[in-house]
Amino acid sequence: MSNLSRRGMLAGAAALAAAPASAQTAPAVHVKGPLVWMNMDQKELDDAYDQAVYAPNRNVVINRCKRNSELARERLGAPKRFTYGPTKFEGLDVFTAKTPNAPIMMYIHGGSWRVGTASDYHYAAEAFLNAGANFVVPDFANVGDVGGSLLPMADQIRRSVVWVYRNAKEFGGDPERIYVSGQSSGGHWIGVLLTTDWQKDYGVPMTIIKGGASGSGMYDLKPVRLSARSKFVHFTDEMEAKLSAQRHLDKLVAPVALVYGSLETPEFQRQSRDFYAAVKAAGKPVTMAVMEGYNHFEVMEAIGNPVSLFGRAAIEIMKLRPA
Amino acid sequence: MNQAAKVQEAKGPLVWLDMDQKALDDAYDQFVYAPNRDQVHKRNMFNSDRVRARLGAPKRHAYGSKPMEQFDLFATGKPNAPINVFIHGGAWRTRAVKDYAFMAEAYVRAGAHWIGLDFDGVEGTNGDLLPMADQVRRGVAWVYNNAKSFGGDPSRIYVSGQSSGAHLTGCVATTDWKDYGVPNDIVKGALCCSGMYDLKPVRLSKRSDYVAFTDESEEKLSSQRRLDRLNCPVIVAYGTFETPEFQRQNREFAAAVKAAGKPVTLLVGEGYNHFEMAEMIGNPLSLLGVAMLEQMKLV
């Protein structure tokens, strides 16, 4: 049975019974084709970059996070909205800390580079506010909005950090304590942000970011480029080279905390492990936590829980404690 | 499980509301509606290990003479602190409360002691629920009588439970405490998450294969029939992906408490199944974590 029809069947069963079909599954056995990446043939590589194959409760968890974002806004009130750049995408949400001059956590959302909106990640705000930080979530273009290239997205996200650095005082934030976190393709962006040449490209200090927590990210785009994701991301040699954080570790000047789930796809587990090993081999500070029994979206959800491994990693990289 | 297949089966005679035997059996079998049961349990064990690594091993106290009559105490640093007593679920079967330690950190950080009771499962009571209810009640009475010995405030005891543990929590909240020689108001609030409060339909289901229900246990341990004794605010909660009966039991219990003119809050976890509801109790920022901490006046 193809992935498509298997997924269609799961979705159909869930709709019929209003019961989640969320047992962990792995792709069906198939006749193996030529290897395209490590020990994987094309189908296996495609599956390893398709979260739904390994996390059939994807939509359940995404909807839960949307709902919990609404509940968070009911408790906290609506965030302040600022514009950080000229295009319609370039706005960011700020939940302000209770105390002035507090550190800032910027959360970069995931969604395969293709979907996602800042307001669906407000569920994570309270964990950081309660720990004593501001919480900032930028919006940015999806890859389909910018001709299939990740480079304009990288520039937007980097400019959102520069805006926060230059305007932190406007919302009571400490520009000298900016931290970043993100998950999935947002984890990819955390790697990119932490290996940006800030001085040369943006005229701000290399140490603009003081630490990053990255969940379930991608740090080398080569296998991603070889996968079915190249149908919606128009990878180029330049894009692959510039946005593979693992190849720019010389620019890394802040500590990194990596997190992934034991039920993620083989590639999403490997990417984190290999990035961890590479940062460590470069002699730079890095930690890694494996969440046993969590799939990709359950890791995403966990940043809203300050006592989970992901929530804790992001809070602790800020030198704060869960509260 | 394959819900579509079930729908296509011919319906048998109705045994409870609009349900035939198979539908009722399924409605008391969590796995039919929550296929990630084992995954979530594994996660809870993993997170419980993490909590013990961070907070240190809990103190172990005995509240009775039987081997299972003990509890884990995760103490908060504050003196004279409120106490959350947790009663675990597991379809009344034997479980170890150490696998629920993942809940403790949220309460300990907020300034409360967290106590997880161990008690017998039906395997240890010849299928009888009455000795289990007696055990958890004695556990709560022990905590009241001995709170000061571990820095707890006996006047701020709260009880929480999930699934069959919420059934027992309902029993605890409707106890005639003079049978235990303690004041009638020793419980100041309760969280009943995904519980059962009327045992009649449970008795009609295949849970009778391993629970030896009697008229006496059905009557005495259906807390919905004992609301005259309820004298603390109750939070009742269920998830939208729970079985039809587990949704109904909680809705109807909340409605009955309200009709009795007593304080009750009904919370609905949208997109959560039975086991994910229990997991939520350990997240201080979740629907249930916030509600419980507010009830304990800790936020």
Image (cartoon, coloured by chain):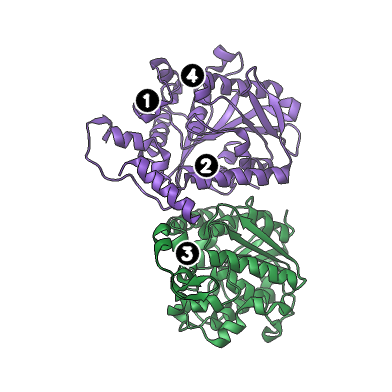
Q: Chain for mark 3? A: B
Indicate which disc, 2 or 4, sits on the residue closer to the N terminus: 4
Q: Which mark is residue A147?
A: 4
Which residue position holds label 3?
B30
Q: Which chain is purple?
A: A
In percent of width and height, residue B136 lies at: 59, 76
Asked if A150 appears above or below B2 in the picture, the reply is above
Answer few, some or many: residues within 10 Å of disc 3's Cα (few below 14, many 20 plus, some between 14 and 19): some
Q: Please, what is the three-letter code of the amino acid marked with disc 3?
A: Gln
From the viewer's side, name the closer residue of B84 and A296.
A296
Establish whether labels 3 and 4 are both on one chain: no
Q: In this view, does A266 lie to the left or right of A148?
A: left
Could you tell me which secondary element the residue under label 4 belongs to?
Answer: loop
Asked whether the beta carbons under mark 1 and mark 3 sit within 8 Å of each other, the answer is: no
Indicate which disc, 2 or 1, sits on the residue closer to the N terminus: 1
Could you tell me which secondary element the residue under label 3 belongs to?
Answer: helix
Answer few, some or many: residues within 10 Å of disc 1's Cα (few below 14, many 20 plus, some between 14 and 19): some
Q: Chain for mark 2? A: A
Q: Please, what is the three-letter code of the amino acid marked with disc 4?
A: Gly
